[in-house]
Image (cartoon, rainbow, N blue to C red):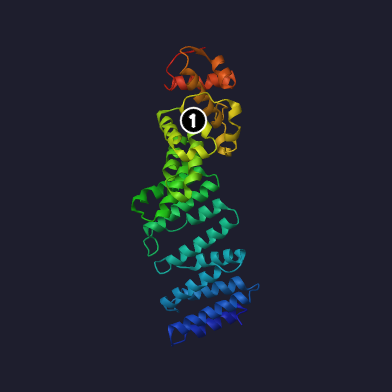
Amino acid sequence: MADTVESTVCRLLAINSFKGSPMVQFNSYVSLFDEILANANQNLYNVYDVFVVNMVSFNVQVVVGRMTMNKVISKLRQISDALAVDLCQITLERLPRNYLFDEHIADVIQLIASIVERHGFAKQAAETLATLPFGKASSYNTVPFRFDMYVKIARLFLEADDVGQAEAYIKRATKLQPKITEQQSKISYKMYYARILERKHKFAEAAKHYADLSSIPHVAMPVLQRAIVCTILSPVCQERSILLAQLHQDKRVKNLLAYDIIEKMHLEIVVKRSELQQFETLLQKHHKSIAADGISVFDRAIIEHNVMACHKLYDILSFEALAAISGTPTDVTELVGSKMIAEGRLERHVRE
């Protein structure tokens, strides 16, 4: 029974000196490890530490050591999360940083990350995966592996509201994207790239990516709905006009929420505040964030559209009149309208 460090060392020495079949020796190590887990007590961590140190030492044939550690990591996936994380940490401390055990190190890091993520710590999971030795040549570190990991890390950082780090890792994936052939990997990349653009308030770019993704059957309608939201929130520009036209012509959009808003915007009709209640149910927290000038992303988009729609009708119009027609405060309407004029997006004269 492997209860103490001393008894474990004795058992290991006996197995190490076995001269028979490597498979028999492998099975003996696995049986010992099973006993260590089954008889877990206050000595568990020290006993496990001794076991791992032995498996990666010169006392064990490399092939047997690698096979045993593969089995050990597999069994760590089956025990309690708290114990698995502790034993994984010991494993990482003891595995040598060389090509013989690089794959095992990667497996342990991914196991820790999956446990941490499962318990709701997305940022910690992302930071754990970021420690993978991506720059080191090894059998597992292929282009598809790095691509999928970069996308996963970006997703986790995004879930943790760290948009900057999410963008950094999705850009790493972008460099590898031309070499990727797996369709699901490409879909995941495009999806999270679009979400990152959306979170950075690059709504027109995000809407375009969502619209492109809508050609894929199993994700079509959810991403099309996101394309609608992002298009409506986009600043008035040529790209937005193109998106509005595309969405207005798409027959699928007629069955989705906020189609009526898309239609009005495409036809350059004023959208009243009372008509936006259903659309507002689609908005998330970042869609309503407040800029430095005190105007929310949502309000700015609606005001910009209404200013432009009204301005198409009148050569000379006061900000008071624009505010009354669009149903927004005069000072806010004036602030948005003035900015549009300064940016060259509102050409006609608006009377002060």
Q: Residue furthest right?
A: 42
Q: Position of residue 181 (x, y in %)?
A: 36, 55
Residue 281 image-quadrant placement: top right
Can you give x and y, in whole percent of width and height, for residue 114 in the image?
54, 59
Which residue shows up at 63% across the image and 77% down it? 39
Relative side of 85 to 60, left or right: right
Q: Is residue 200 visible?
A: no
In this view, the residue in front, 123 or 196, is 196
Residue located at (49% from left, 28% from top)? 265
Amino acid type at circle 1 is Glu
Whether residue 161 is visible: yes
> At which x and y percent is residue 21?
43, 86
Counting from the top left corner in percent of width and height, residue 57 is at 46, 75
Between 170 and 99, the residue placed more toward the observer is 170
Q: Quadrant of residue 240?
A: top left
In screen coordinates, is 233 left or right of 2? left
Above or below for 192 versus 239: below
Q: How many marks?
A: 1
Q: Residue at x 50, y 24 (%)?
A: 269
> In the rendered image, which quarter contains the N terminus?
bottom right
Instruction: State the residue at coordinates (53%, 75%).
Output: 51
Give the labeled residue for mark 1: 263
